[in-house]
Each structure stands twice: as C-alpha cells, then as structure tokens.
Image (cartoon, rainbow, N blue to C red):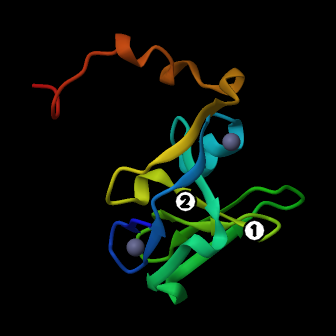
Amino acid sequence: MQKIKGSCLCGAVSFEVVNAFDKMFLCSCDQCRQITGSAFASNLFIAAERVSWLSGGADIVTYQMRGRDISKSFCRVCGSGVPWTSGDGSKMIVPAGSLHAEPKVAEKFRTFVSEQPSWSSCLDQVEAYQGFPP
Ligand SMILES: [Zn+2]
Ligand SMILES: [Zn+2]
C-alpha cells in the first residue's frame, strides 16, 4: 500500500499514512470553525494503525473539549493541526492540509452546511487571483 507523508508547517512533527482514507468531512460546524479559525475543517478518517509518527511526538499538544467528542492536536512550536485519535481510539483523524501529497479518499462529505458562515459561501463569486490582488 502506498504511503504519503505529512507534517506541521515548521516540520517538528511529521508522520506517514497509508494513502487510502475511508472518508473526508469538510465540516462547517461552529466548533470546527472556531477550532480551525477558518471556514471549515478538512478532516480525513483512517484506521489508527495506518498512521505512523516519524518525528515530534513530544511536540504534540492535544485539546479535548469538555463533555464533547471534539478534540484537536497541534504542534506546540508552530500551531499547525496534526493527526489525532478518535474518542474510542480506533481511528485517526488527519487534517487534509497537513499532507504533502494528494489523499485518496473513498467518500467525501460536506457536513453542517447549516452552520456555514455567509463569508465562506458562494466562493466562486469572489474575485480570485493566482497570488495577491494587484
Ligand atoms: Zn510545527
Ligand atoms: Zn465540525
């Protein structure tokens, strides 16, 4: 099985994962908006044993929301999201943006579109540039 690598921005935390993800949630719920600071979370799900850490285990910090199965792991040096374990320990949730190659995903879903903020809808109608606007 082909593996791909991922890391945080500063490179302290790195991992590799089998490139055969079960599903992807592009989640616009209020909790994902706040925890990412962005329009939606892009989370891939895969069996826990298919992810192996290459470096930086000691630099990973995990936040667990009290009373909810909502958590996030991030690099304590640069703050980037890195994979974390699901509540029951069976799955790893991999932030898609942490990967260095295109993930292969069996099923993709947009979730909680009812909570999507208006500033992130109809993005095809927002002026777009290859880089910064002139
Ligand atoms: Zn980092
Ligand atoms: Zn969510």
Say which residue appears at 51% left-offset and 41% top-offset. 38
Estimate the x, y position of residue 15 in percent, counting from the top left.
44, 75
- Secondary structure beneath disc 2? strand
Quadrant hosting residue 9: bottom left
- Looking at the rendering, in which quadrant would you find the N terminus? bottom left
The kind of residue tagged 2 is Val
Estimate the x, y position of residue 79 in percent, counting from the top left.
47, 66
- Residue 46 versus residue 66: which sits nearer the camera? 46
Q: Is residue 89 left or right of residue 7?
A: right
Estimate the x, y position of residue 81 in percent, counting from the top left.
51, 62
Say which residue appears at 65% left-offset and 70% top-offset. 48
- Looking at the rendering, in which quadrant would you find the C terminus? top left
Mark 1 within 8 Å of ligand 2, using the beta carbon:
no
Q: Residue furthest left?
A: 134
Circle 1: is it few (<14), some (14-19), or many (20+) Cα within 10 Å? few
Residue annotated with mark 2: 94
Say which residue appears at 80% left-offset and 65% top-offset. 87
Circle 2: is it few (<14), some (14-19), or many (20+) Cα within 10 Å? many
Q: Residue furthest top?
A: 125
- Residue 4 versus residue 43: which sits nearer the camera? 4
The answer to whether residue 16 is above or below residue 42 is below
* CA–CA distance in space, label 2 to label 1: 13 Å
The kind of residue tagged 1 is Ser
Q: Is residue 99 left or right of residue 76?
A: left
Estimate the x, y position of residue 56 in percent, counting from the top left.
45, 85
Mark 2 within 8 Å of ligand 2, using the beta carbon:
no
Residue annotated with mark 1: 90
The answer to whether residue 24 is above or below residue 80 is above
